[in-house]
Structure formats: C-alpha cells, structure tokens
Amino acid sequence: MKTPASLKNKVALVGVGESDIGRVPHMSGLGLNAQAAKRALDDAGLKVSDIDGLLTAYSFTEPYFMLGSVLCEYLGLKPRFNASMVVGGASPAVMLKHAAEAIAAGQAETILVCAGENRATGQSRDATVATLLAVGHPYFEQPYGGSIPGYYAMIAQRHMHKYGTTREQLAHVAVQTREHALLHPNAHMKKPVKLEEVLAAKPIADPLGMLDCCLISDAGGAFIVTTPERARDLQAKPVYLQGIGEYHTHEHLMCAPSLTEFGATESGRIAYEMAGLGPRDIDVAQLYDCFTIVPILELEELGFCEPGEGGAFFAAGHARIGGKLPVNTHGGMLSHAHAGAAGGLFGIVEAVRQLRGGLGARQVEGAEVALVHNEGGILSSHCTLILANDRG
Amino acid sequence: MEAQLPQPVANGDSLPYWQGARERKLLIRQCKACGELHFMPRHLCPSCWSDQLEWVQAKGTGSVHSFTVIRRASDPAFASRVPYVVALIDLDEGPRMMANVLGGDAMSVAIGDRVQVTFEDRGDGALVPQFTRVAG
C-alpha cells in the first residue's frame, strides 16, 4: 500500500476552546459547541469571517440530520468546506486530518473543528447508555445483551490472560488521570479518588467497575486549523502538525482481527514516519481513555513500552506529570470530560496547551512534542497525530 | 423462555442463518472460491470478494476466546438476567462469534473453556444460538 502523502508542517493549530463542562443543564448541545467555538476563535484572535470551513462529528442527544450543516446554520456560517464525520471517538483526530488535507490542497484556509453533546443533562443516564448500544452489532451482538463496557471488558480480560495485567494496574489509570484532572480548572471531576475506591466501585462488566469507565458529561470542544503562513501573525504561539495517520480494522468486536493487537500500531507508524520522530521524542501523550484498559493498550501499540507492559507503566507512575511520559494531563475522558466526539477532541486541546506552555502545576516541563491518539468504536478506528511547537 | 429478550431480526444476508437456528443448526458462510469461512454472514467473501458462497453447518463446538460478566445491563431487556456472561466464541471451524454462555456453571467460565452450542427460545419459534460449557 502506498505511503500517505505527507502533511508535515502543512497546517498549524491556532485556537482551542472548551465549553463549560460537567452538568450544564441550561445549555443545548449546539450551544456547547458554539461556546467552545467562540472561545477557540477568541483564543486565536480571529474573526468569524476568517472561517471558511467547518467539520463536526455527531450527536446522540439532539436529533439533527446533517450535523455539519446544522452547526453552520446555528453559527451563521456559510463555508465552502463542511462535513459531519462519524468514526466514533476517532472523529476529532480524523477531522484534523481532513482539515489538514483540505488546507494543504487549497480548498480552505481556516477550518473550525468542533464537537460536543449535552450527554449529562440532555437525556437520562439510562437513555445515554441505551443509545450507545448501537455501537454493538444490531443482529449478531445486541441480541446477547452486551454493552460498551462489556465489549471493552472482554478486551481487558484477554490482556490480563495473555500478559498478566492486573485489576490493580487498571485502577492506577483511573487514579492518575483523576490526579491530573484536579490540576485542570474546567475538569468535570473535582475530588481525588483512591485506588481502593476504584477497586470497590460498583461492578459494571468484569473486570471493569464504574470508575474504570469514562464520564458522561455535558461538554463541547473546538480547535481552529489554518496555514502556517496565516498562523504567523496570530496572537497565540502556533502549534504545528508534524505527522498524522489513521487505520481502520473493523467496527464490531466479534470481527476484530485480534483482542490484543489493534490498529494503533499502524496509525502510529504512519504518524511517526511522517513526523520523522519516534516514541522517544514524545514529551507528553494524550491517549484515548474511554476505559482504563485502553490507554494501557495504546502505550504498548504506540511504542512507549513493550507489549504487555502498559499496566506496569501506569502502576510505576511513569504516566504522571513529572514521570517518563505524562499521559492525559487534563484528566482524560475518565476525569476531565466525555461527551461523544468531544472526549477525544479535548486530548488535542490539551496537547496544544501543553506545547504553548504556562499551565502551572499541570505543565509538562519543556514540552516540545506531543502525541494524541483517538480511537472509535471498540478499538476499531484509530488516528494518531503528532504536534510540535516549532516546525522541526 | 424469557419472552422479553430480543428476538432475532433477519435480513437478506442472514435469513438462512436464522431459519437454520429454528432447526437447531448453526450455519456459517463458506467461500467456494477461496474456501474461507466467515462470520457474520455477508453478500460476498471478505477475504477474496467472491460472491460464490455457500452455507455450511458448523459442528457447534468451540472455545471461549474472551468473556465478561455483565453486572449492569445497558439493555433494559436483560436487567432481570444480571449477572450473565457475554463471550466471544472461537468455533472449531475458525470463525468467531458472540453469544452468552448459559447454564448453572456459566459464572465459572474461563478463557479457553470448551463450549457447545445450544439454542435459546426467544418466543414464536425463534431460537438464538447460545453456548454451554463442556465438562472436562
């Protein structure tokens, strides 16, 4: 297969924004997107008229068809480039890739990427959980009463069987991302959590308990992508895309080629190759963490540790701020926010902020290169991207 | 019978599969061109794209590739069944499918356990393939 054309240094991220996060009952899903978009625009120092493209994902809480067009209408935009993308949690990283492709091809100059939903208050918790059943195969999985936590639990179980990963190692992921969230002023979770509390939390699907599962938040996130030339005279320090790759192997767990090897290895390989960098060059990583097993797998697949050692990596504290490779410095989807495609988008927002610097206690000292990984479905669709605060 | 559990929904790809299940047969698709077996049933072979496929009856034996015990059901229809086992079963013929492991000893299931197909009544004559552990 042909190597994808390079997108290295073709675009810069110049503005990032988060809506209010948590339980925000007075705002609609579109409102959360709009608030995040306005904050990203202000962050960039751009005008609304500078935006000539928009990408968004999907919403489970609001019944709109053509969400990209709906959001443009809501925001009063008439762009020349617009789409809604549905590759699950991988959507934000894939949207960045599509934005970069469009900008590199001259189809647009400045693209707003946003996503978000009012999942905490826009519908009941049970309705959210039931809606998410659609990720399972309607005819060959759903008749057996599985659930998204259940599918990921089967992956965790297999990892434990193959490598000896422990229940405690999974719990360390939840504890550490919570520690990071407490350093983030806008994180959904505000209280620390102890290892024993994670282990004793309500069981959901063995071996996963409630605190191994991501949040259900009201949240919207946005970032703005433009050309490096346009970025030069904007107010914030630009962050440059160095490498990006995607890889898709299945949607439904029963069709996954393996329960221990997923598409992150290949999406990461493409991203590293494009950037001319390797795992050792990464200063901070924002990994997808819908369940505690997931960042463990991603650490392994993206080359930060050997296969089977992801759990020990977390348990040893290497993923803490100040550790070998700080992971999910904003608190991830386990503790910062999860609302549809916004969950993975906040990893991109946080990577940009880390590379700009000045985050106080949350700052990874000397961060120059960041990696973000998004995955969608049941580790089905993968996209890895590498950002840097200079052009390499 | 737990009539409240979902009944199978057949479509153009799967009608013979669900008809077979009504006769307590586990049918899988085999490609006549390359010989590969696959699950779930499709219009063409996902290995070579030949549309010359046939239905073959699986022996109904296999092993547990992985499993979970659902302690909180996402689908309200399954709430009364909690806790229950959802597993990925590797059929001896090769293809992998999802099912419940049923039976009095289901909660002691482990990866690698041998299992045998059984058929669960979902009402109106509809049966869905399920598995039970094989002793020894």
Image (tube, grey):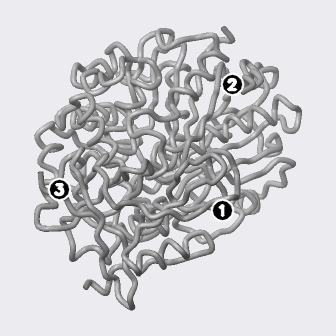
Chain letter for mark 3, please. A
Give the position of the C terminus of chain A as an image quadrant.
top right
In this rendering, the label closer to the viewer, 2 or 3: 3
Density class for disc 2 (Cα within 10 Å; few <14, some 14-19, many ≥20) is some
Chain letter for mark 1, please. B
Residue closer to the observer: A177 or A306: A306
Label 1 in the same subunit as label 2: no
Name the spot of residue B32 as percent of width and height, x first: 63, 54
Classify residue A289 as left or right of residue B65.
right
Note whether A277 is above or below A153 in the view shown. above
Name the spot of residue A50 as percent of width and height, x first: 81, 40
Element at badge 2?
Answer: loop
Name the spot of residue B51 as percent of width and height, x first: 70, 58
Identity of the amino acid at label 1? His
State if disc 2 and disc 1 touch (CB < 8 Å): no
Element at badge 1?
Answer: loop
Q: Which residue is mark 2?
A: A235
Density class for disc 1 (Cα within 10 Å; few <14, some 14-19, many ≥20) is some
Label 1 in the same subunit as label 3: no
Identity of the amino acid at label 2? Gln
Q: Which residue is mark 3?
A: A202
